[in-house]
Amino acid sequence: MDKASLVGSLMMTFVVGLVCWQATHGDLMSLWSAKGFYMVILGSIAAVMMSMPFDRIKMVPGYVKRFLFHPGTPVMETINQIAALADRARKDGILALENELPKLDDPFFRNGMKMAIDGVDPDTIESTLRLEIMAMQDRHKSGKKFFDILKTYGPGLGLVATLMGQIGMFKSLGGDIATMGYMLAVAVVATMYGTVLANCIAGPMGDKLAYRSSEEILRREMVLQAILSIQAGDNPRATLDKMASFVPANNREQLKAA
């Protein structure tokens, strides 16, 4: 579970709920508008289906799961694995690492090491693993794209519903004041739905997925360079020095101490 995502989601829900409660003096049903719901929520779903292929839309539960749960291995843990493999390869030869493969939970790392142990050409290893990184990056872009569509079209559809409500209000000028008030409420509530969807849900979730994607790409690039270094027979210290370039400056002292 990603604690920041969980705490942030709960805090956002609390803040929005508190403001709604105070603004309506406890009458939360005054914020309900079927017309606004149809236009903003159902309209946003329609916009997603018009913008993305269905096979990517089916992956939406996975996008939400990735937002709440971060399955990636911490960088320092990966570096510790790399250090152990480099040291073992230096002492016993790269073929000795075959027994270590089942201990690698990351399929990307495991497959790359398997190719290195099998003696595959370094250029082939690099090109194969980079293709896998590119494919992963494309999948991650689909998740970001889904939330970007909601962020873009949600407020726009809310504005459409607002304009419709204003048209109904203008047509009622000089008539029943209750009808005018109802149409104005439809206009304002629809705008609120679109704004909340974009700024409280879709925007933050999309940005978190983009951050996780860049983090995973960097980690896989680090693993790729480590595999090539181990296969080349580099000194374990030289391999760790290469890994240090992927670690923030304030964590490099911890790496050197290890």
Image (cartoon, rainbow, N blue to C red):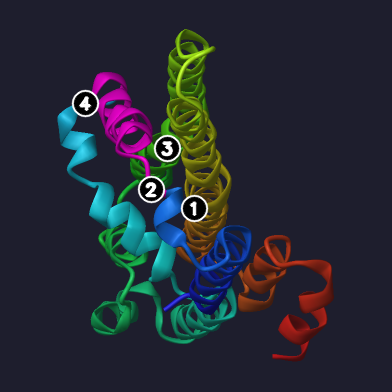
- The label shown at residue 53 is 4
Q: Picture quarter containing residue 239?
A: bottom right
Distance between the Cα atoms at labels 1 and 2? 24 Å
Which comes before the other along the chain, label 1 or label 2? 2
Residue denoted by label 3: 141
Contact? badges 3 and 1 (CB < 8 Å):
no
Label 1's element?
helix
Mark 2–mark 4 distance (CA, rounded to whole Å): 32 Å
Residue identifier under label 1: 205
Camera-near label (2 vs 3) is 2
Main secondary structure along the magenta-highlighted residues: helix
- Report if the CB atoms under discs 3 and 4 are less than 8 Å apart: no
Alpha-carbon neighbours of circle 3 within 10 Å: few (<14), some, or many (≥20)?
A: some
Looking at the picture, which amino acid does disc 2 mark? Trp
Residue 116 is at least partly visible in this image: no
Q: Which residues are magenta?
A: 32-51
Which mark identifies residue 32? 2
Residue located 37% across and 47% down the image: 125
